[in-house]
Image (cartoon, grey):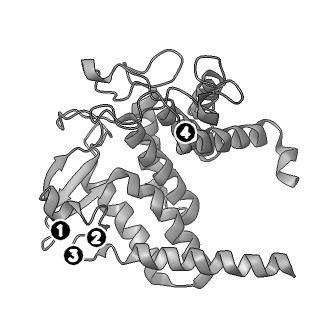
Amino acid sequence: ERSRGLGDVYKRQLLKSADELAKLYNPRVGTLLSWPWKVKESNWPHNTIIDNMMNLELLMEAYKLSGDTTLRHIALSHADKTMKCQYRENYSCPHVVDYDAETGEVRKFDWNNGSDDVRVSTWARGQAWGLYGFTMMYRETKNPKYLRHAEHIADFLIQHPNLPADGIPYWDYSGSQVSTIRDASAASVTASALIELSTYSPHKGYFKTGEKMLKSLSSDAYLAKPGKHSFFIIKQAIGNYLRNSELEGGLSYADYYYVEGLLRYLKQINPSMEQK
């Protein structure tokens, strides 16, 4: 009885969170507004960051719980506009797209994280957010366009000439001198996404690359000693290099997606875990 009561509490909070997120949607643009305070501060009338692909899982889960088709529509619209307008021909993306809030047209690519050269900026964690987000959208919709896009992103990343041999990417794939510091958080998100993607595209080497990343993250180079590194699991995670923020420290999402990736990996190599 107590468990059922807690479940209702969690459900109400999840639905409330989704409703609040939905308030940031601009139907003229077709995406969620990421940072309301930057509308004036940075002259970004409607800014959308690639990180927002991760928020769509909340909307899709709330839709399944409530039946509110508006939440599903927002998630699909955001994914479609991001796929169309935030990706380059090679399936890389900048951190920020600055849209015209009235017409929905792209004003420019911009950055808050990643290299400040937006012509080539390929912020590693941003690429991971996109890969994870489109893989998740395929899981939730079974629409093959999302699977194809996730595959294109994955192929770009795992075949990238600047990807180090151990699979832990530089902070930005562009290869500029300011980007040669590693970001283990990007590897954690990418690895978890690749392991899931491999269940939909089993013959493309995604599982093997995700496995390599997880093994590297589990090595002494990236795995913190118990009780050390401010009690984070993963070290060598980068918040924002150019803004001198959280350099080579611990990040909650590095730890979270590392553990999630391990669980996904273990369930694949030992299917009986799915029954537990």
Q: Secondary structure at mark 2?
A: loop
Give the percent coordinates (x, y) of residue 231. 64, 35
Q: Amino acid at mark 2?
A: Gly
Q: Quadrant of residue 27?
A: bottom left
Q: Amino acid at mark 4?
A: Ala
In space, the residues marked 2 and 1 are separated at their CA atoms by 7 Å
Q: Secondary structure at mark 3?
A: loop
**Mark earlier in primary sequence (4, 1):** 1
Which residue bears the numbered disc 1? 104
Q: Label 2: few (<14), some or many (≥20) within 10 Å? A: many
**Mark earlier in primary sequence (3, 4):** 3
**Mark earlier in primary sequence (1, 3):** 3
Q: For the residues labelled 3 and 2, say whether their Cβ atoms are less than 8 Å apart.
A: yes
Give the percent coordinates (x, y) of residue 139. 58, 58
Name the residue located 47 percent from the left edge and 56 percent from the top edge: 54
Against 238, is 95 above or below?
below
In space, the residues marked 1 and 3 are separated at their CA atoms by 6 Å
**Is residue 250 shown left or right of residue 227?**
left
Name the residue located 65 percent from the left edge and 40 percent from the top edge: 261
Q: For the residues labelled 1 and 3, say whether their Cβ atoms are less than 8 Å apart.
A: yes
Name the residue located 28 percent from the left edge and 58 percent from the top edge: 48
Name the residue located 50 percent from the left edge and 59 percent from the top edge: 137
Which residue bears the numbered disc 2? 30
- Residue 28 is labelled as 3
